[in-house]
Image (cartoon, rainbow, N blue to C red):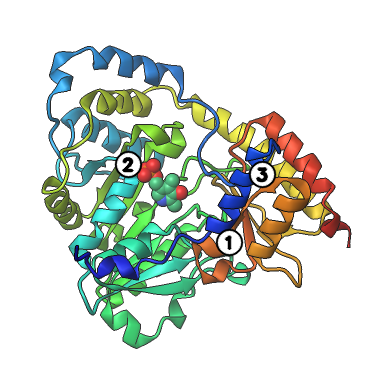
Amino acid sequence: MQFAKRLDRLPPYLFVDINRRIAEMRGKGIDIVTFAIGDPDMPTPAHIIDRLCEEARVPANHRYPETDGLPELREAIAEWYRERFGVELDPNTEVLPLIGSKEGIGHIAFCFVEPGRVVLVPDPGYPVYSMATMIAGGEPYYMPLLEDADFLPKLESIPESVAAKATLMWLNYPNNPTGAGAPLEFFDRAIAFARAHSIAICHDAPYTEVYFDGKKPPSLLQAGGAKDLSIEFHSLSKTYHMTGWRIGMAVGNREMIRALFTVKSNLDSGIFQAIQLAAVRALRGSQAVVAEHNEVLQRRRDKLLEVLDQVGLHARVPDGTFYVWARVPEGYSGVDLARELLEQVHIAVTPGIGYGASGTDYIRFSITLPDERLEEGIQRLAGWRGGTR
Ligand SMILES: *Cc1c(COP(=O)(O)O)cnc(C)c1O
């Protein structure tokens, strides 16, 4: 067999060791509390499930769907954007449903990337931005997200020679893994930078509805001129606890939406219509679930931050997302600390390096575990002896 060279470029999976050790310990009957999974523990709200069940019985929904989604879904997405962000979208040209936003995040690379081209990628960041870039034959350029800059990329430090070769820039706020939000003013600056260098922006925004302290995050499309050169990826996964359903959307610049549709329509055949109609119910139904979810998450966030402080692990207070990004103490790497916490107090966290080199000295806690497990994990963390040094 002759596999394609592009496969060799993809880095090996980083945490083989730690995951093997977790499996080994669990095999011996050791109970591990895991803060390592970024997937909501709370179920999808019942009204959404009910609509799926009704629509699953309708024979028309058993056939191939259209790749560009049901008009009703595109309209519901446009209404939701108007209601939530005050952003106007044409449901026929500026909205494209996706089989989960990850699908579109991967496919958009084929619209902008070719050998010799560069994609600006946040570091730390969701790995798909750089992986899809490499699969499409381009080069990621990593923009460090540092705590002293509120985890926003310093656009002015991107070399002119890099900006000249860049065709796409990825942004993601509220940010996975740092939990940081971005002010609208930052989006204005990003758009000015992108315009000056003929770069398109993709804003990955699945966490705009997962926010704390009542501070609603903005959409990139609220920034002036955003639609001239950008699209936003959004998703029902995190907002309505629908990660397994696989439904999301891209919205914004119509040429970019058309290009993504061209690639997609040649590779996939859309989303099961019953799921699309359940998504319509989610978007048009009561949004009370958002506040309910955020209340639970904020309480968990605060409990975790309190114990992190006690054991001497510093973390910037997250503005949103499911994550707490904690700096490791002097003398540790994130991998060292993740190992030590696993061995000593039987809790699992993700080493920050999994999200990029700038995450080397961090670990990521996810707060998507049931309250009683979180409580147990916090007790164990409080007893970590490294913390008392
Ligand atoms: C969860 C997540 C996604 C993917 O969401 P889906 O719509 O479920 O594919 C994309 N980006 C980030 C940063 C995420 O955390």
Q: Residue at x 45, y 73 (%)?
A: 143
**What residue does disc 1 label?**
352
**Label 3 SS:** helix
| Quadrant location of the C terminus in the rendered image | bottom right
Q: Residue 278, image x and y in percent? A: 31, 23
Q: Is residue 118 above or below residue 388?
A: below
What residue type is disc 1 on? Gly
| Quadrant location of the N terminus in the rendered image | bottom left
Earlier sequence position, callout 1 versus callout 3: 3
Q: Residue at x 45, y 27 (%)?
A: 287
What residue type is disc 2 on? Gly
Establish whether ligand 1 lies closer than 8 Å to the Cβ of label 1: no
Q: Residue at x 64, y 39 (%)?
A: 26
**What residue does disc 2 label?**
100
Earlier sequence position, callout 2 versus callout 1: 2
Q: Residue at x 59, y 49 (%)?
A: 323
**Label 1 SS:** helix
Relative to the observer, which residue lies in front, 312 or 79? Answer: 312
**What residue does disc 3 label?**
25
Relative to the observer, which residue lies in front, 111 or 211? Answer: 111
**Labels 1 & 3 near each other (Cβ < 8 A):** no
Relative to the observer, which residue lies in front, 350 or 15? Answer: 15
What residue type is disc 3 on? Met
Establish whether ligand 1 lies closer than 8 Å to the Cβ of label 2: yes
Establish whether ligand 1 lies closer than 8 Å to the Cβ of label 3: no
Give the spatial CA distance, label 2 vs label 3. 33 Å
Q: Residue 94, image x and y in percent? A: 20, 47
> How would you rate the neighbour count of disc 1 (Cα within 10 Å): few for under 14, some for 14-19, many for 20 or more?
many
**Horizontal side of residue 35 vs 249, given as left or right:** right
